Amino acid sequence: MSGLVDVLTKKGTVWKSVEVTGAATTVTVWTPATSTRIALTGLDISNFGNTTGTILVYFTSGTTGGVQRIGLYSLGTTTVLNLRFPGLETRIDNLLRAVTPVAAGFTVNAQGFELE
């Protein structure tokens, strides 16, 4: 094996989770270790309320505001999204965040790797 496959086999899987209840908010789902970037392999979003609205999931530097959108997902009664895809953040030290403009209760679970 070579390239990215080699790197991924030498790194352990990272699991991150955040639960949100209440007011409209932005949450950080994953803060990578210093000088690494996130290789996202899975994303699960569960809505445990009766709120309709959206959740935007994105990579960002957190300070300069540059955003790489992953997806905009609709909330509904007990919505569960189970997404499996490769998503590589090309910039080091960028965060994975989720934001919703409505008061909602939801959980975001992210799986992947941290690469140098």
Image (cartoon, rainbow, N blue to C red):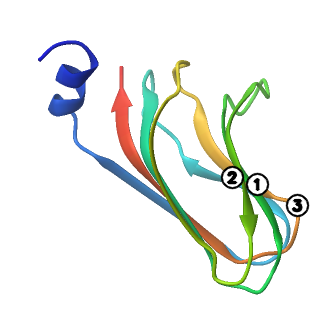
What's the residue type where badge 3 is placed? Pro
Which residue is labeled 3 in the image? 101
Q: Nearer the viewer, residue 23 or 70?
A: 70
- Residue 106 location, quadrant: bottom right
Could you give the CA–CA distance between mark 1 and mark 2, rounded to whole angstroms? 4 Å
Which residue is labeled 1 in the image? 99
Quadrant of image for the N terminus: top left
Q: Residue at x 22, y 24 (%)?
A: 5
Query: SS for tag 3?
Result: loop
Residue 61 relative to residue 25: left or right: left
Query: SS for tag 2?
Result: strand
Query: Please, is residue 98 above or below residue 112 in the view?
Result: below
What's the residue type where badge 2 is placed? Ala
Q: Residue 78: give x, y in percent of width and height.
A: 64, 82
Query: SS for tag 1?
Result: strand
Which residue is labeled 2 in the image? 98
Q: Is residue 42 visible?
A: yes
Is label 1 in contact with label 2 (beta carbons under 8 Å)? yes
Structural crowding at the residue carrying mark 2, measured as other residues with C-alpha within 10 Å and reported as few (<14), some (14–19) or many (≥20): many
Q: Residue 92: give x, y in percent of width and height.
A: 51, 21
Could you give the CA–CA distance between mark 1 and mark 3, rounded to whole angstroms? 7 Å
- Residue 51 location, quadrant: bottom right
Q: Is residue 19 visible?
A: no
Quadrant of image for the C terminus: top left
Is label 1 in contact with label 3 (beta carbons under 8 Å)? yes
Q: Residue at x 65, y 47 (%)?
A: 97
- Residue 94 location, quadrant: top right
